[in-house]
Image: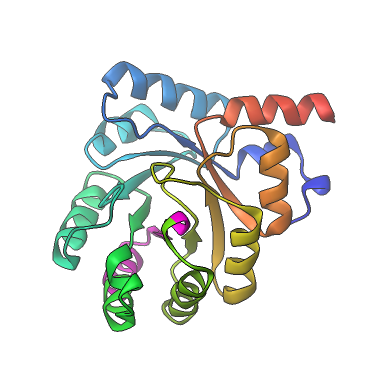
Amino acid sequence: MNSKELTREQLAGMMDHTFLKAFATEADFEKLCGEARENGFAMVAINSSPVKLCKKLLEGTKVHVGAAISFPLGQTAIETKAFETEKAIADGADEIDYVLNIGELKMGHDDYIRKEMETIVGICRKHNVLSKVIFENCYLTKEEIRRAAEIAKEVKPDFIKTSTGFGTGGATVEDVRLMKETVGDDVKVKAAGGIRDWAACRQMIDAGAERIGTSNSITICEQFEMEG
C-alpha cells in the first residue's frame, strides 16, 4: 500500500495500539482500550494475562485483542507456547503475536522453527484467529531473517513481524523490505519497535508493512492529519 493514498481511517486500521509493560495496571488497559475504540485502531497489543479484561472493555467494537506469546524472549518450549496460545484464545484473543525461538534459528535448526510455526499457526487457524510471528531482527543476520521468512512463506502465518520493541533495536526499512520481498503476497509484514512518528511509519508502509505496532498510534495519526 502506498502511504500517499491512505486515509486517516485506513491508517488507524493498520495500527496495533500497544502496551506491553510489566507494570501495566487495569487503569492502563482501560485507557488503552478507550483510545483504540475512539480512534478505530486495528488491535490492542497486550501480554496474555489481561486478554479477558481487554476483551470485555472492547465488547461491541471492531477492535481486536492481540496477545503476545512467549514475550519478549521466545525462550519457552513449543508446548508452552501452544498452551499459552490456547489459553489466550480461550480468554478472547482475536490475534496472536508469538516470538520464535531466536536461539534455535541462529543455530540453523530450521526444522524446529518450522515445527514451532506450524504448531502455533495451526492453533490459530483452528480457532479462526490471526497469527503473527515475531523474528526480533536486531539479533539476526540478513540471511537468518531471509531463512525465517522462507519458512513463513511455506507455513503461511498471517504476518511476520520485525521486533518485540524490547530488543536492542526495532524495525528498519531495510528489514521490512527484505521480509516482504521474501514472502511476497503469501504473508503480510508487521513493523514494530521504535516507530514513534508519522515519518518513520510512512517509510515502513512504503517498504511493505501492512500493520504497525506502536505505543505512539495517536501521535502518528495526528501527525498524518496535520501533514494532509
In the image, what residue occupies the spot 65% across and 64% down?
Answer: 177
Residue 8 locus on image (x, y percent): 72, 35
Residue 101 appearing in the image: no
Would residue 124 be found to the left or right of residue 18 on screen?
Answer: left
User: Residue at the spot x=45%, y=72% of the render?
Assistant: 144
In the image, residue 170 sits, relative to residue 76, either above or below, namely above
Task: Write down the region rendered in magenta.
Answer: 118-138
The reply to whether the magenta stretch includes residue 96 is no
Q: How many marks?
A: 0
**Which quarter shows the C terminus?**
top right
Quadrant of the image for the N terminus?
bottom right
Residue 52 placement, left or right of 188: left
Q: Height in image: 78 above or below 212?
A: below
Q: Nearer the viewer, residue 61 or 169?
A: 169
Asked if residue 97 shows in the view, the reply is yes
The colour scheme used here is rainbow
**Residue 129 is covered by the magenta coloring:** yes
- Residue sitting farthest toward the top: 27
Residue 68 vertical position relative to residue 195 in the rendered view, above or below: below
Dividing the picture into quadrants, the one containing residue 105 is: bottom left
What residue sits 32% from the left and 47% below the top?
Answer: 68
Is residue 34 placed above or below 205 in the rendered structure?
above
Residue located at (72% from left, 48% from top): 203
Q: Position of residue 36 (x, y in %)?
A: 50, 29
Residue placed most toward the observer, 126 or 36: 36
Residue 73 location, x and y as percent? 28, 51
